[in-house]
Amino acid sequence: MTDKMITFRETCNILFSQEESYGSQRQAAQDLFSLLAGIIGYDDNQPQQEQAKDCFLPSGKAISLQGAARCLWEFARTSRFLQGVEAAVRAAQQRFPGERIRLLEAGCGPFALLALPLAIKFQSSEVGFTLLDIHPHSLEAAKTIVTALGLQDYVNDYVQADATAWICPDPLRPHVMVSETMQNALKKEPQVAITRNLAPQLLPGGIFLPEKVRVDFCFLYWITNEGEVPFQRTQPVATLYELRLDNPHDPLQGQFTLPNPLPENIRPGLCTHIQVFGDCCLEENQCSLTLPLRVKGLELQAGGTIHHEYIMGEVPGFVLTPG
Ligand SMILES: C[S@@+](CC[C@H](N)C(=O)[O-])C[C@H]1O[C@@H](n2cnc3c(N)ncnc32)[C@H](O)[C@@H]1O
């Protein structure tokens, strides 16, 4: 085994584990970043122009190679997603006995981070990956990593395409799909549009990750304590939307009633909960995707109605208006 593969194996093992400490997962994410960035010749302090360029699609922002590479630093996110993907592939093996599991990573970025680490858990006869991204530089980088680590047998295909419109050839329909193309409160990036396009293309009985993303409306309040200003939130007032495999076409709008009286000193906010797979979840504040998001400019009236709508478009996100 090469030195690169030894480091890959050791760092990924730590990220897959549920037992490792915060510190060791953080270190593993940094070491894995150094390894993979070194392989593709990426310098985070001096990225080339095309590596730092986001791409703006009709369905939202596809972040640059740089942005996608940096996702690895969010080690709690990376770790939970890896644990979820491993569990999903094991579940797919139960559901499709004897079949080689086809896994699509939609939005693989330069490191194909939610697919390639599975190579330390499964044989290439058990699982094969389709790596898809809109950014040609990211896809090229993923290919370089696959070759450098000798993982060619695991890869079925590289696809440069918009995941919100891509149609999978029928004989290659995946057993498992994973896409992490989101920010908190499903803003800016195209997770909803990607899920709506891809989830129906799974094999019947297939698994889409994350399994559920729920966005709740809640009240945020600030606590001032010796100069620190942490904030907390109340129990959710209403669930605005739950993105799931079995409801990708549910309505994106609705309304709810505010309590009467309103609690004091609060601000409206959106909270995000991600169920990656089974009991593998990202709870509030565990990573940037689950940070509460303040809703600015919304006037609250005790007992009043709030209309909400999730807008799919160049800048996806929730719009809330009093009604
Ligand atoms: C947040 S990064 C995730 C990278 C990697 N999957 C991970 O989890 O570390 C999202 C990736 O999705 C890609 N992406 C976003 N929208 C896309 C779209 N509509 N079609 C294809 N790729 C897209 C971006 O280019 C970026 O590489």
Image: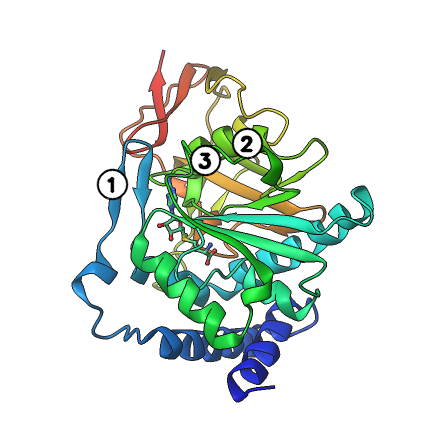
- The image shows residue 301, relative to residue 19, as above or below, that is above
Q: Residue 194: which disc?
A: 3
Please, is residue 130 above or below residue 10 in the view?
A: above
Whether residue 240 is visible, yes or no, is yes
| N-term-proximal mark, 3 vs 2 | 3
Left/right of residue 139 with respect to residue 129 in the rendered view:
left
The residue pinned by badge 1 equals 56
Cα separation between marks 3 and 2: 11 Å
Report the amino acid beneath label 1: Phe
Residue sitting nearer the eye, 284 or 187: 187
Left or right, 20 with respect to 34, comes to right
The local secondary structure at tag 1 comes to strand
CA gap between label 2 and label 1 equals 23 Å
Query: Image quarter for residue 150?
Result: bottom right
Does residue 228 appear in this view? no
Q: Where is residue 2 in the image (x, y as percent from the top left)?
A: 55, 87
Which residue is under mark 2? 243
**Between 230 and 190, the one nearer to me in the picture:** 190
Q: In which quarter of the image is residue 16?
A: bottom right
Between 302 and 18, which is closer to the camera in this rendering?
A: 18
The image quadrant of residue 181 is top left
Question: Residue 322 or 151: which is nearer the viewer?
Answer: 151
Q: Judge the density around disc 3: few (<14), some (14-19), many (≥20) Cα neighbours within 10 Å.
A: many
Q: Does residue 234 sit above or below 17 in this rendering? A: above
